[in-house]
Image: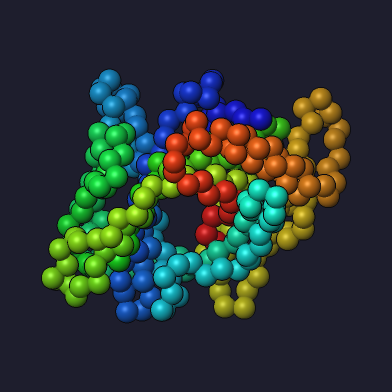
Amino acid sequence: MLDPRNSMDHTLDQVKPIYTAVWIIADNAGDMRLEMSWQEDGDRHGSSQPELVELSRTWTRLDRGSTSSSSLIDISLLNLKNSSAWHFELSASHAVDNKRLTSDQEAMVGSVRADLKTARQQPPDTPFVKWHPYIRVKTLQQRTSYLFALKNSSYTLELTRFQDRVYAPRAYPAWTGECQTYEPRWSLEVYHSMWDTLLTRNEHLAVGAMVDWDDGVKTWFPEDDDITDFAQVKGDTGFEQLVAKLGQLEELVLRNESEMFGSMEIGRGIVSPDG
């Protein structure tokens, strides 16, 4: 069912993890969300010594008084026989231009350092990122993700180990880094590569303006590609095909849960990136 998502990888065991840190930062106008991702690169600057290279950095703002992105769609498909569910979610937050960051926010993100050794070992009591506390951080989630492609489609399967930290609500500058650390969890998420592209057009819409993407089922849940049929005409059964794939993935995870993940809890869901 799976292929490496990166065309440079030829087998599944060549897939490199992506390390991500997500901070929720206190702000009177609405908490800020900073997400940064890194990946190992052993060929950077001609060196064979692996190091972490930053892949992305995104700032968004949550609604005032909210602790998470605003939910636009929230649907669950429940299986009462085995107490499992697939969760369909679409969430939104406000895009923030880097030019509109405060000096403290710029100083904080400039101080972030990711440690490769800690990221690889994933000790439960030590985050792989460090930063200077210029502003008050409310929560930190660190993730280690492996991306795969579902065959004959543009869907991406993301297997993620994540861990949350909630910091003590002390007034800055008395914040000392004291936090409550939760147990690591695993999640299995599926999303389509086109969703990111389409939803990005929403970032800078004027008030009352509409986006130009199609909201039809064929656009958001395209049918599988039949590599033997060059004249293929796609219909409206893409959603059913996706749900069938999710069922196969669920069987795989439940069958190998104890062997692959030990005693860690498994979360299964389908999400689209924040729009």
The answer to whether residue 101 is visible is no
Q: Is residue 126 left or right of residue 219?
A: left
Q: Residue at x 53, y 41 (%)?
A: 158
Report the number of discs.
Answer: 0
Dividing the image into 4 quarters, which one contains the C terminus? Answer: bottom right
Dividing the image into 4 quarters, which one contains the N terminus? Answer: top right
Q: Residue at x 62, y 30 (%)?
A: 2
Nearest to the observer: residue 122 or residue 219: 122
Q: Position of residue 54 (x, y in %)?
A: 34, 42
Q: Quadrant of residue 262?
A: top left
Nearest to the observer: residue 138 or residue 94: 138
Q: Residue at x 26, y 64 (%)?
A: 167
Residue at the front extreme, as displayed = 81
Colour pattern of the rendering:
rainbow
Q: Residue at x 52, y 70 (%)?
A: 70
Q: Position of residue 267 (x, y in %)?
A: 53, 49
Relative height, residue 97 to residue 235 (above, below): below
Q: Is residue 171 left or right of residue 82?
A: left
Relative height, residue 99 to residue 273 (above, below): below
Q: Position of residue 26 (x, y in %)?
A: 30, 71
The answer to whether residue 161 is visible is yes
Q: Is residue 92 left or right of residue 48?
A: right
Q: Position of residue 120 (x, y in %)?
A: 31, 34
Relative height, residue 16 to residue 107 (above, below): above
